[in-house]
Amino acid sequence: MRLFILLSVIVLAHACAPAGPISVSDPAAMSDRPNIILITAEDLGPRVGFMGDPVAVTPNLDRLASQSVQFNRAFTTAGVCSPSRAALITGAHQTTIGAHNMRTSSYGENMDEGAPYRAVPPPHVKAFPELLRAGGYFAVNDFKTDYQFGNAFTVWDRNALGADWNDRAPGQPFFAMINHEVTHEGRTWPPDTDTALHPVVSRRNPLNAEIDAAKDFPLTDPARVRVPPYWPDTYEVRANLARFYDNIRVMDGQVGALLDRLEVEGRFADSIIIFTTDHGDGLPRHKRTIFDSGTHVPLIVRFPDGFEAGTQRDDLVSFIDLAPTILNWAGLRVPEWIQGRRIFDDPAPEAIFMAGDRFDEVPQRFRGVREKKWHYIRYFSDKPVIPSLGYQNVNPIMREMRRLQTEGGLSPLQASYLADTAPREFLFDTEADPDEVRNLADDPRFATIKRRMSGRLEKWIEDSGDMGRIAERDLVARIWPGGQQPQTAMVEACLTSDGKVMLASMTHGASIGYGGADGEALLYARPIDAASPFQAKAVRYGYKPSPVADFDPARLSTC
């Protein structure tokens, strides 16, 4: 009876995944598929030379952009890393899969309620690198994850600092994701930042001093930077912006070294190379907002055959579009649950969407819809546009704004971002007002546009199953009953009629690894040939992994 139930679970799992990965077993076919390299930087909007920033010194990225397709309207689904990365890695909005609160691991920290947890996406949702692995790719990550649902061992073949693709099987295509942290918000603090401001500062100061010591170029002149009207134009603000530009130049050098290596290894001839960032600038009124300053990112795609090299596109691109686009390049079907589109094959949308929820110790909720010209944002909670967050308050620009707020030295616009309650609605004409400082939501001349945008947003909230409508404490009780992390059921096995080993876990949505010393070496995607004893292990995203199971094929029963 147990084996019958197990087989039924396996059949049901396949029936629930009509758009699963294609099985590729022909090595010759595998070798014809492109390698795909996704290069990311952190906390960086379009402050790069190829997007027209006159201060940014980014010769390596500019060179790559000249060989690439450039997307001028690419946006993340959140203005902060973890929710944005959850959407990137799954191709589904973070609000749909319950990964919207930043961070799940900080819930309860400096708060009146809560305890750390991990998001539990719906059982059919898989990270796209795992789907690539199931389709025959070797997937490596160097090395940031931060997906909110934990680091499931089935997502990557290699996940470590310095991980690369050189121990893959002969002829096996690879996907690599390589992250650069030097532009992160915490790297823009001067290395002598007061350690009393936040516990993390004492750890960051020595690293930031190392970054400064490595800057072997003329530093950016604070007088050259542009200060947008939502910040006070003071030396402290300019100095922090100049430091940010210096870090961007360091990042560009790191990317240049990587590109040199790829060129020497022949990767320019056989790989699709992508560059983007995880959200907008790591600065106040940018990060943790869904203004364009928090979600607009650079995006370039270089094809080895020079396809559309040097061209620019203005269609709307969302971060959820990367997963289906990459799966399509790999020759794999795109699962139906993925909410994004194939950027080069599907029609461009009329609008894309973004969201903000709890950030660290401040619960809140706001949603946005972006058309090519118009941007509409609605706040559902009574919080400031820029609430007081311990981590963000370390930023020199944030400290300067709060100092001037106390002294009455902010302009009305600047002071409005720190007011007790944000406006319920924002509407911006992004072509006439790229800084998004003129709110048209209450102007009757734009009432028709606001109704259209508001209707789009309400429909998306309903259609996408926005889990931000659920209080976080209730969400946690639903996915972690009693506040305890569930554990994935142990792997079970049986023999198919043709002698292959079939593996399954009774936990719906579990992924399975097998082989190696801990059962994690290989991803189980279809029945396997096994002549010798082996180990296997299962994990559902957000759950504890199962115990390791030992199997001897000679002792297995038939399915």
Image (spheres, rainbow, N blue to C red):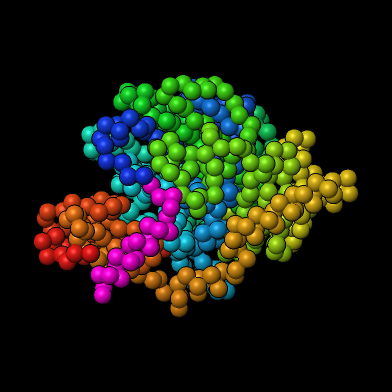
Depth order, front residue of 68/79 = 68
Give coordinates of residue 251: x percent, y percent. Answer: 47, 34
| Relative to 535, 367 lies left or right | right
Which residue shows up at 55% across the image and 58% down it? 96
| Relative to 534, 30 lies left or right | right
Which residue shows up at 45% across the image and 26% down it? 303
Judged by its main secondary structure, the magenta piece is: helix
Report the quarter where the N terminus lies.
Answer: bottom left
Give coordinates of residue 89: x percent, y percent. Answer: 46, 48
Q: In this view, does 8 lie above or below 299?
A: below
Q: In this view, does 398 lie above or below 549?
A: above
| Relative to 438, 445 lies left or right | right
What is the residue that sits farthest to the front in this orientation? 497
Give coordinates of residue 455: x percent, y percent. Answer: 74, 54
Report the quarter where the C terminus lies.
Answer: bottom left
Give coordinates of residue 87: x percent, y percent. Answer: 51, 51
What is the residue that sits farthest to the right in this orientation? 444
Boundaries of the magenta span: 1-21
Q: Is residue 308 above or below residue 226?
A: above
Q: Is residue 468 above or below residue 448?
A: below
Which residue shows up at 16% across the image and 53% down it? 530
Q: Can residue 421 be seen in this view?
A: yes
Which residue shows up at 30% across the image and 33% down it? 29
Q: Was residue 2 drawn as part of the magenta stretch in this picture?
A: yes
Q: Was residue 47 drawn as part of the magenta stretch in this picture?
A: no
Q: Is residue 163 visible?
A: no
